[in-house]
Amino acid sequence: MRLATALCFAFSLLSLIIPSAFAAPVALDDLIRHPEVHQVKLSPTGTHMAVARSHEGERILVIMTLSPLKIAGALRFGGKEQVGEFYWANDERVVAEVMSRRAALEAPVNYGSLFAMNVDGTRKKTIFGYAAGEQQTGSRIKKAEATYAHATIIDPLVDEKDEILISTSPWARDWESHGDVYRLNIYTGVRKKVVGLPQVDGRAYTDGKGNLLFATGSNRDNDYELYAKAENGWEQVTHPVLRNARPVGYDHTHNLSYLVVDTPNDTEALVTWDAENQKLETILQHDIADITGIIRQPKTHTPIGASLNPDYPITEFFDEGEGFAPFYRGLKKAFEGYHISFTSFTRDGKKGVLHVSGDRLPGDFFLVDMDSKKVDFLLSSADWQNPHDLNPMRAESFEASDGWRISTYLTFPAGGEDAAKLPMVVMPHGGPHARDFWGYTRDAQILSQNGYLVLQVNFRGSTGFGDHFYDAGKNEWGGNIQRDIAEAVQWAVAEGHADPERVCIYGASFGGYSALMNPIRYPELYQCAAGYVGVYDLELLYKKGDIRRRDRGIAYLSETVGLDPEHMRANSPLYHTDKLDLPLFIIHGEEDERAPVAHAEALLEKLEAQGKSAQSLIVKHEGHGFYNEENRKMLYTQLLGFLDAHIGVGAAED
């Protein structure tokens, strides 16, 4: 068979990444490093590829010719700026988002600027943002202007050599100002306003050919809204199914819009909307999982399938996509046990860059030829890591005491999948309206490399399992969410995976909250707890941090944690420290704006006043999660030492 023969390279690759049952532990330094290669994208004609990679602690952009494979140009800002996401605007020019480090913060932040460069490294220019302004005296030639806003590229305008279409979100102290849609010249930075946006906190969407179709946003009550383009501006969509829909594509052959819609008491559905005939049709819906991503036909970009994550990643197709769907299935079979997705295609759809990742593979990039079916390795995200040495993640689920299906991920230490009663670290995710996925997870690898079974739980309130599951977590921070986590621990013990006498809980953000709240609610389950950038006082969310600065943020808080002071205190670790009779480790960044360091400081002060000691690590210049590699090493070295001391693996590195 031609496909099987052509993909022999992929099969030979997979033979190299079958894990060893008794691999040596991976050095901590190798696990805390930032990826070397972040993203790879092909130019429209396939003559070049753009590679975002790390170099001397900075993220840069390298442009390479494909034949022969050599560097043609590079973009490196130096100083406090580095390259963020990037896009091919035409075959000779790349547009990149600019990430900037604030004076007091290690992690770079996107302030909305766009920077453009030719493939040979020439004609470099800031084309949008606060640094785009040009002095203009006496000339009628229009020049670029400084703009204090974030820009999102919504259409590369493939038929326009000099312009792209952007959607903006202005910097505003009230965080309530509306953005605009502009045509932006990628060489001069001169922009022309197309239309204002109808609501804040959203963006516009096109048909892929420059024609505006929809815009999204949210009102002051934090309710999501969809608008359709009208002759004069925008018109809010009031259709009962479509009013909260998310646009994901367009079919020019049949004049159909593709949208993802919420379904009451069910998972998301992918629908088509024929605006002219007012016809709505559901074309894909999974019984467990929401839609994670859309698979498109390489040349037309018409949606033909979707990726989903009920437990392990899967794909479902509703259209054969002129032969692309069977080819994609063949790639899935060749890379069985791994997640695949395309980062980019050439304009003619004949070549693409494939990203392959898994629980033991941070990510590899391949060049795929659609005609010859040839797959060639390009670059690895982390070539210093040997998949032989990394540990597998297993997806399982159980039924909660009130009937909800709760999905979990278990990462076992080397040789531990068949072992019983392992020391276990429970690692609840942040959010709480987020979710864990099957795949490479740095914290799970670090902990499992040191002998711990790691349990991750998609408790109620997690995204990805339908609105009904999401809504079940509202106002349940300290209630049913914590019960789900506790029942997951009890399930892991009952299954024989975990030793009930050696269980610790560790999490970040909402996971940090849970790391303390769960032992308060279920003290019999844990021998120690570690909270990382956690929320410990729900009332403080209304007084400090970035969420409270917006009307929509206040609306979100009122919906998720409530307004009643007694309820918030009843569900805040700060007011229940008397029940924390176990070893504690509190970790925080001084510049955290999401969960300000005041949470950790108040908790530590309260514990000290009660005569309870707690290990702590408060780090300067770090925010909501540590970015600097030396600070990461300090964090994990101390965390592993803490775990070793209390659930006894004894594998922490010096």
Image: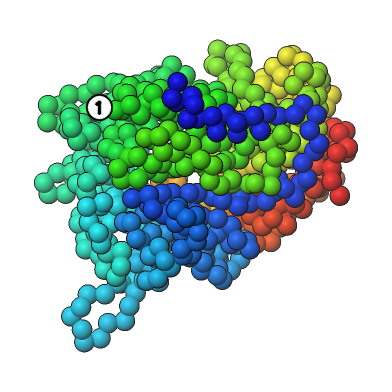
Q: Is 142 in front, or is 383?
A: 383
* Residue kind at label 1, given as amino acid type: Thr
Q: Is 95 in front, or is 567?
A: 95
Q: Quadrant of residue 452?
A: top right
Can residue 166 be seen in this snapshot?
A: no
**Which residue corresponds to the image point at 41% horizontal and 19% vertical from the top-left?**
286
Can residue 94 be seen in this snapshot?
A: yes
Instruction: Count the labels in the image.
Output: 1
Q: Quadrant of residue 79?
A: bottom right
Which residue in the structure is indicated by mark 1?
Answer: 272
**Which residue corresponds to the image point at 31% horizontal and 45% vertical from the top-left?**
347
Q: Quadrant of residue 133?
A: bottom left
Left or right of 438 in this view: 267: left
* Mark 1 secondary-structure assignment: strand
**Which residue corresponds to the image point at 53% horizontal and 36% vertical from the top-left?**
356
**Which residue corresponds to the image point at 73% horizontal and 57% vertical from the top-left?**
630
